[in-house]
Image: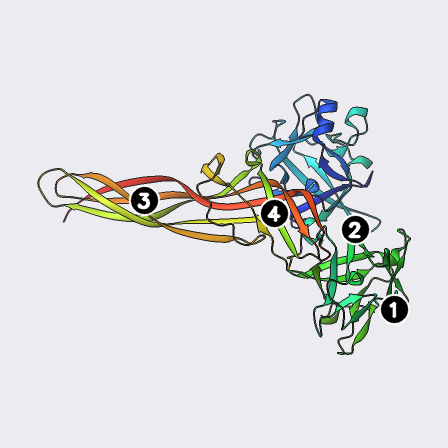
């Protein structure tokens, strides 16, 4: 398990596609559960291909596989159908003979120097890509107890992927003068002094290919970046040219380095302070001059039509906390009812995020009319009453409110009552969809429907009063 990242994308070696759930339309057409998973995913940056490997509590080296899109765990469909669904509400590992058990053992091995994994279900069968029934083709199946070519998977680290904004972006050097990279003079990419973000020659579209590689298309030439000798030129039409493919690596919130895959070297610009400097592609190490800031080519962003899927939320990190304590002494010889006031702080934290890896310099405005709240250890509801502010998109914001609670306690004669206010604090994660409106420098705008939202909230619930008594000295 130490060899595996926490958040992963699971790729079949057999068909080269990623594990994902079927669409709602396909589930209706085939009569399948919408939680049925298969190897049909083609976009490695899609939230629909993200899984979490959770360590088992009772079996070291074993894991539960949680589908992050709906917060459910992979489990077999039934005792008679061994196809896997992302449908278990909780990880199950107590009874290893139960088909509902969600335990898997990752087994690492090499093929031609490349690292691959198999996942053996607790039933001793290997999870594999199905090729036996046409309707279930490419599904994830609990196959034979013997290995075969369909049970071999590549595991990709989700958190190492650089997911760019859907809009056009510009690059400028992180160190030195910080001018924009452009091809304003000719097809050669340069860092020029007198070029601004509004200039189309600095605008680029990023398209992800394969396992997190990108191609960079310059809007002014409509052609892709390509490495030629030691320079970058925006002149490529050939999608198969390895010299026009780059691997982005995130090094800070909105800072990346770009490795060109032709010679496996990094792009860089000379920080000389001259009015122009070429974009080179022959540095072998990540150093200051290889770092580029990614800037969105938008004037504003707005997030609205947020739709929380709270029925697919999950609750974790439950902790019982003593919030306040009061003491009531009754030195008299008769029973007394005594009124106490508890004053304590309620702490809440909320965060709204999407799957974009890079922190944008353009902060969106967010329209939101309710937020998820933990009601009890098993239930999340939407509340309109608890909204105060959402803070900054992409970052957690903590709020504190002072609260008073009155309580009447009966205290026997010659007795001290110690009253403790106890609450439960928990964290919830709730996926959501939303609309995003982006406005551009030319006065146009674009609306995109997105499915990659994730809400993380911390709140207290289940307030309890606990009373103990002791005899007065």
Q: Residue at x 28, y 47 (%)?
A: 342
Q: Residues within 10 Å of mark 3 (few under 14, many from 20)?
A: some
Q: Residue at x 71, y 74 (%)?
A: 177
Lateral position of residue 94 relative to residue 374, left or right: right
Indicate which disc, 2 or 4, sits on the residue closer to the N terminus: 2
Q: Are marks 4 and 1 in contact (CB under 8 Å)?
A: no
Q: CA distance from mark 2 to mark 1?
A: 23 Å
Indicate which disc, 1 or 3, sits on the residue closer to the N terminus: 1
| Image mark for residue 303 | 4
For the residue pair 332 and 33, the one nearer the viewer reads as 33
Q: CA distance from mark 2 to mark 4?
A: 23 Å
Residue 61 in view in this figure: no
Q: Secondary structure at mark 2?
A: strand
For the residue pair 189 and 144, the one nearer the viewer reads as 189
Indicate which disc, 4 or 1, sits on the residue closer to the N terminus: 1
Q: Give the labeled residue for mark 3.
A: 421
Q: CA distance from mark 4 to mark 3?
A: 39 Å
Indicate which disc, 2 or 1, sits on the residue closer to the N terminus: 2
For the residue pair 75 and 357, the one nearer the viewer reads as 357
Lateral position of residue 406 relative to residue 104, left or right: left
Indicate which disc, 2 or 3, sits on the residue closer to the N terminus: 2
Which label sits in the foreground, 2 or 4?
Answer: 4
**As displayed, is residue 43 above or below residue 283?**
above
| Image mark for residue 230 | 1
| Image mark for residue 207 | 2
């Amino acid at each position: 398990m130490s060899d595996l990242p926490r958040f992963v994308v699971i790729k079949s070696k057999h068909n080269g596609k990623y594990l994902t759930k079927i669409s709602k339309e396909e589930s209706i057409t085939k009569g399948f559960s919408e939680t049925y998973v298969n190897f049909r995913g083609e976009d490695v940056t899609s939230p629909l291909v993200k899984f979490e490997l959770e360590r088992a509590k009772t079996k070291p080296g074993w894991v539960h596989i949680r589908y992050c899109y709906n917060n459910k765990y992979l489990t077999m469909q039934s005792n008679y159908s061994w196809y896997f669904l992302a449908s278990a509400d909780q990880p199950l590992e107590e009874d290893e003979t139960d088909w509902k058990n969600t335990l898997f053992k990752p087994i690492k091995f090499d093929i031609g120097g490349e690292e691959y994994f198999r996942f053996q279900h607790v039933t001793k069968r290997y999870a594999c890509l199905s090729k036996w029934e046409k309707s279930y083709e490419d599904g994830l199946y609990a196959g034979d107890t013997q290995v075969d070519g369909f049970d071999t998977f590549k595991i990709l680290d989700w958190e190492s992927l650089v997911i760019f904004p859907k809009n056009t972006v510009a690059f400028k050097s992180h160190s030195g003068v910080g001018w924009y990279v452009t091809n304003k003079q000719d097809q050669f990419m340069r860092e020029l002094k007198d070029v601004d973000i509004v200039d189309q020659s600095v605008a680029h579209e990023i398209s992800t290919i394969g396992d997190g590689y990108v191609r960079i298309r310059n809007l002014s030439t409509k052609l892709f970046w390509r490495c030629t000798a030691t320079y970058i030129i925006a002149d490529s039409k050939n999608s198969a040219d390895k010299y026009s493919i780059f691997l982005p690596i995130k090094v800070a919130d909105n800072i990346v380095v770009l490795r060109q895959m032709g010679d496996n070297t990094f792009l860089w610009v000379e920080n000389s302070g001259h009015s122009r400097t070429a974009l080179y592609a022959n540095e072998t190490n990540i150093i200051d001059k290889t770092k580029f800031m990614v800037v969105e080519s938008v004037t504003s962003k707005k997030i609205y039509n947020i739709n929380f899927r709270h029925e697919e939320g999950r609750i974790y990190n439950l902790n019982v906390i003593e919030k306040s304590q009061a003491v009531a002494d009754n030195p008299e010889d008769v029973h007394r009812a005594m009124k106490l006031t508890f004053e304590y702080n309620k702490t809440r934290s909320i965060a709204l995020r999407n799957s974009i890896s890079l922190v944008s310099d353009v902060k969106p405005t967010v329209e939101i009319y309710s937020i998820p709240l933990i009601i009890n250890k098993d239930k999340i509801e939407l509340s309109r009453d608890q909204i105060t502010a959402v803070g900054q998109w992409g970052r957690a914001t903590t709020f504190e409110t002072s609260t008073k609670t009155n309580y009447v306690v009966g205290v026997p004669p010659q007795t001290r009552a110690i009253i403790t206010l106890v609450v439960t604090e928990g964290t919830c994660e709730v996926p959501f969809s939303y609309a995003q409106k982006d406005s551009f420098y030319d006065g146009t705008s674009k609306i995109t429907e997105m499915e990659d939202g994730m809400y993380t909230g911390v709140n207290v619930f289940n307030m309890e009063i606990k009373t103990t008594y002791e005899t007065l000295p």
